[in-house]
Image: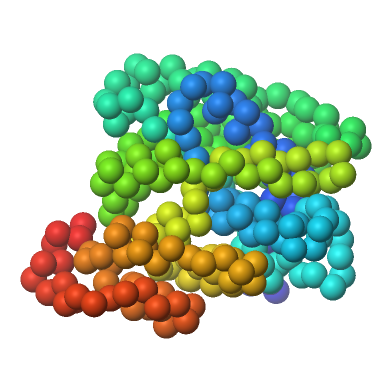
Amino acid sequence: KIEKELIYMAKRFLYTLGNEEFAFLANRIGEKLKDTGIPYNFVGGTAVQAHILHRLTQKYHTNVKSLAENKHIRLQDYIRPTDDIDLALLFPDNAQNPALVSSVLRKFYDGLDGVFLSHDEKHLFEYQFARRGERRPVLKVTVDDHNPEDIALNISQQSRHLRSFGIRFYEEFISQGKNLVIPYTPSYELKLKVCKPEHILATKISQFRAKDTMDIHNLVTVMQDAGEIIDTEELRKILLPVHYENLVRFNSLTGINVNLSMQAPQAEDSSLIQ
């Protein structure tokens, strides 16, 4: 019984962009980050969700809410729920000016706090910071005075925060981001700037945890279903030679043939990976 209760509690704290309070917050985050003038992208699981929903709404010629209500389409088979929103910000000089970082984040956070009417004017969404911080602030989210839930923001400010990738790729990931417009209802849209698919896949392949495996499978499946060709040379450029073994796993998982025509890194060179 206790185990079942813990599983239930864990599920309560997970969101997808199909949840209105989560989608509304993501939209507002994009608006407020744009106001700061600092280049940014949604990354991680939320970006994967956005890419998948963008393609599903195009495939079925409908909006997110209609997808969620369609008994013949199981959104949970396509998108993995999450309890946080991952963001990558590109500050000047790789965020070497702490005063600037603090000032920008303060302005950004101030724009998220408050009580807001949902887009259809049927619900009240309240967002309040339970914890502020420069890397992982936490928002308490309340819908219509029900018990609040937590949504954390994971904020990367410089290249070292994106594991295994240097400043060059960090800058490319943000500068080459895609502006997605996703119909949410007939009268409301999500407008999110997200990493392009190959860059999301690269970050997922580099770690290959259980949740990354799910995201890789779901994103690749939806892209292939849409007739898109994944840029394998981009993956190769970013991930080899450091993540050779994980690219082998990616090829096996997806059936995609990323060219691995090189020697695998030697064991004694593994210190260079970290």
Q: Quadrant of the C terminus?
A: bottom left
Measuring from the top left, give residue 22's x and y in whole percent: 69, 44
Residue 194 as seen in the image, left or right of residue 115: left
Left or right side of 246 for 104 = right
* Residue 190 position in % (x across, y down): 71, 41
Q: Residue 238: horizontal and vertical position, in percent?
A: 31, 58
Examine the rendered structure and indicate whether residue 33 appears above or below residue 274: above
Q: Nearer the viewer, residue 251 or 230?
A: 230
Q: How is the image coloured?
A: rainbow
| Residue at (81, 58) in percent of width and height | 61
Answer above or below: position of 12 versus 253: above
Can you tell which quarter of the image residue 140 is in? top right
Q: Nearer the viewer, residue 248 or 147?
A: 248
Q: Is residue 151 above or below residue 106?
A: below
Classify the position of the N terminus by image quarter: bottom right
Whole-percent x and y of residue 257? 40, 78
Q: Residue furthest right?
A: 122
Left or right, 186 with reference to 181: right
> Residue at coordinates 69% horizontally, 50% vertically from top-left?
17
Q: Residue at x 43, y 17 (%)?
A: 103
Number of labels in the image equals 0
Q: Is residue 46 visible?
A: yes
In the displayed structure image, the side of residue 178 where residue 174 appears, left or right: left
Query: From what the image shows, is residue 245 above or below residue 151?
Result: below
Mark yes or no: residue 5 visible.
Answer: no
